[in-house]
Amino acid sequence: SLRQEKLDLTSQVRKCEATIIHLQHLLHQSSEEVRQKQVNIDQLQYQLTIEHRRADEEMNALKKRNSDLSLQVTQARQEADEFYKTGLERNIDAVALGNQLSALKLDLASQGKMVNSYNPQTHFIRELQDENHRLRKQLGNDMSGKKEVASLQSYETLQTKLREAAQRISELTKEREQLIKMGNKLRAELLKYKGNTNSASDDTNQSSTIPPNSPSRSNLRGLEQLQYQLTSKELQYAQRALARNTEQSTPGENTSAQQPSLPNKPAENSGLQVQARDDVTSQWRPSFSSDDRSSLQEVWKLLDEDSPGFTPRETREVRGRQILERTSTPDSFTVKGQPSHVQVKPEATKPALSAKAAGKWKPAQAKAKIRNYNIRDEDVREGL
């Protein structure tokens, strides 16, 4: 019986505990709801205060704008009133002047005089316009006459300048031809002189000289032949250009009033450049190409320095090669550079990673004890 009562009491206690737990859960939910509602109320109050502030700021801005607009309206009204007052005053003055004018007209009409509406300013303006038109016509006639006279004078001066330029071109071509002939003679003498010196030096120095049939000497001779052909062609082109210039500069050929001009295009492979100068009595100098000038200077240097007693043969051969390199290929050029040295970077040795950095090291973790809430402490104690 006691055991039965004990079991009944334990069952009632368990029921009461279950109801208590349920009630506690309901109480917790209600407290959470109350807390959430309080949070919502706080948020709504905060938003309400923010809206009030915004509304107040907008109201203040609108009030300020309204005050500014009202001030501008008052200023505009004052200006309009002043303008209206000035307009009225002007109208009153105009009416008074009109009345005076009508009274004067009546007085003149009563005296028997005709009212003349003559305005002296219009007559003065018309006179000025007529005078301006007349001066423009006179200026146009004067300018046309001056232009005709100036064109005739310029045409005559240009014809004289063309004749003088043609004479100078002919003189320059003659002088150029003489210089070319003199250069060819000097080259021939230089070749003879070189042949004699080479034979003498070969007899004296048989072991330490370069043979006359060397490629450098043959190249030098070929270069001289090419230079001779080039100068002859340049002379032909210069003569053709001179003939064209003389044909174009003959008087009576061009009857139009256009300004004549010399042909300004140089012939191919020719270094002759002629410029028609304005000053007729200015000093002139023969203009020939820089290549011929440099070649003549080198020839004179070789003639002055090429003696068997003072200069060795090797220096002469070097100078001949230098002249060959200068004159053989003037238009060609070479690009020289230094080879780039590539520096190979050594392979970087990677440091060994520790066990912790490599991910191999794992610390020992204590196992968490998991509680089974389905089993109560009282049941466990009873089972024990």
Image (cartoon, grey):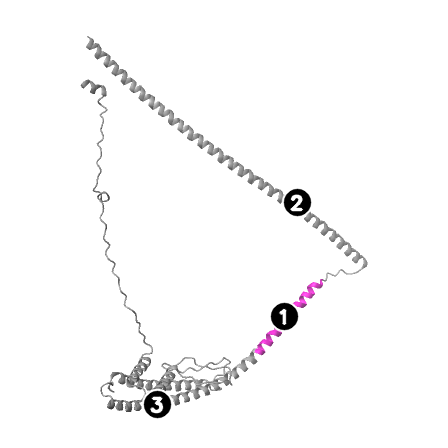
| Residue located at (55% from left, 38% from top) | 63
Q: Which residue is mark 3?
A: 186
Q: Which one is closest to the eye, mark 3 or mark 1?
A: 3
Q: Report how far apart the C-alphas of labels 3 and 1 lie in the structure.
A: 77 Å
Q: Which residue is mark 1?
A: 133
Q: Report how far apart the C-alphas of labels 2 and 3 lie in the structure.
A: 109 Å
Q: Is residue 29 magenta?
A: no
Q: Vertical placement of 83 versus 252: above or below?
A: above
Q: Which residue is mark 2?
A: 81
Q: Which mark is residue 82?
A: none
Binning the other alpha carbons within 10 Å of mark 3 as few (below 14), some (14 to 19) or many (20 upward) gives some
Q: Amino acid at mark 2?
A: Asp
Instruction: Name the spot of residue 132 as percent of width and height, x first.
Output: 64, 69
| Residue located at (49% from left, 33% from top) | 52
Q: Amino acid at mark 3?
A: Leu
Q: Which residues are magenta?
A: 119-146
